[in-house]
Image (spheres, rainbow, N blue to C red):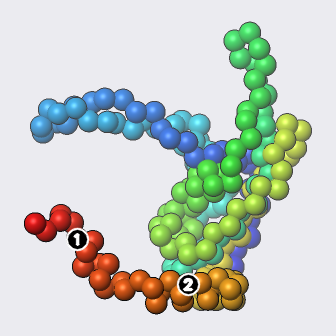
């Protein structure tokens, strides 16, 4: 199974939501309440609409690849022109991957291999996301160079994992 999709959307990064203080209804204690980022929610809704719902969610482990072309929009602020900042691949990946839950797959815990490529971020480009979803079958140990595998094996012989687990108990025994 393999899906390719071109989304004519400007990628939006995931951002930490605004928080406010509220009260727990049962205890009356102060609690933090995360607000909804309306711009992020609108982007995720647009992703869902653009990819379309599959008749049946993809099951099993997945590999996702995202290719991002992000237009850095300019708008008029108070007294000056403002251009959006370039953002990192991880936050664009997070917002887009979250939008695919319930549309292509049930939960992003199914994603075993994910890659994001920022093809371009600039003021004068055509914004888009190219999405590639496929089944993930096996880890290829050849992805890790042999000298790193040798180092891993050395570390495994140095550390007695069972002894470390016995020492690392919480709460500590007195």
In this figure, which residue is indicated by the disc labeled 1? 169
Q: Within the image, what quadrant is residue 138 found in?
A: bottom right
Q: Residue at x 73, y 36 (%)?
A: 85
User: Can I make out residue 137 in this image?
Assistant: no
Answer with mark 1 or mark 2, whichever residue precedes in sequence. Answer: 2
Numbered-mark total: 2
Whole-percent x and y of residue 123? 85, 37
Mark 2 packing: few (<14 Cα in 10 Å), some, or many (20+)?
few
Circle 1/circle 2 CB separation < 8 Å: no
Return the residue found at the far top: 79
As drawn, 67 above or below 25: below
User: In the image, 74: left or right of 33?
Assistant: right
Front residue (pair 51, 31): 31
- Check disc 2 and report its element: helix, strand or loop: helix
Q: Is residue 33 above or below residue 54?
A: above
Quarter of the N terminus within the rendering: bottom right
Residue 161 in sight here: yes
- The picture places residue 113, in percent across and down from the top left corner, at 61, 74
Which residue is under mark 2? Answer: 152
User: Above or below — where is 119 with respect to 148?
Assistant: above
Query: Residue at the spot x=69%, y=79% of the render?
Result: 2
Q: As rendered, which of 83 and 153 lies closer to the eye?
A: 153
Work out how far the residue at label 1 is from the one at label 2, CA to CA, in angstroms: 24 Å
The picture quadrant where one finds residue 137 is bottom right
Residue 149 versus residue 38 in the image, above or below? below
Residue that protrudes farthest toward the right in the picture? 124
At 55% from the left edge and 42% from the top edge, which residue is drawn? 15
């Amino acid at each position: 199974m393999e899906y390719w999709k071109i989304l004519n959307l400007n990628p939006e990064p995931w951002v930490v939501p605004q928080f406010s203080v509220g009260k727990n209804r049962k205890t009356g204690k102060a609690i933090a309440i995360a607000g909804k980022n309306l711009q992020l929610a609108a982007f995720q809704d647009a992703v869902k609409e653009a990819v379309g719902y599959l008749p049946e969610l993809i099951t099993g482990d997945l590999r996702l690849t995202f290719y991002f072309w992000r237009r850095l929009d300019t708008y008029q602020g108070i007294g000056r022109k403002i251009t959006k900042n370039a953002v990192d691949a991880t936050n664009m990946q997070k917002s887009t991957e979250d939008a695919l839950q319930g549309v292509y797959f049930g939960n992003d815990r199914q994603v075993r291999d994910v890659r994001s490529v920022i093809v371009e971020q600039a003021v004068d480009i055509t914004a888009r996301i190219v999405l590639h979803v496929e089944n993930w079958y096996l880890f290829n140990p050849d992805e890790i160079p042999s000298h790193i595998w040798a180092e891993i094996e050395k570390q495994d012989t140095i550390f007695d994992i069972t002894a470390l687990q016995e020492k690392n108990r919480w709460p500590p025994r007195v």
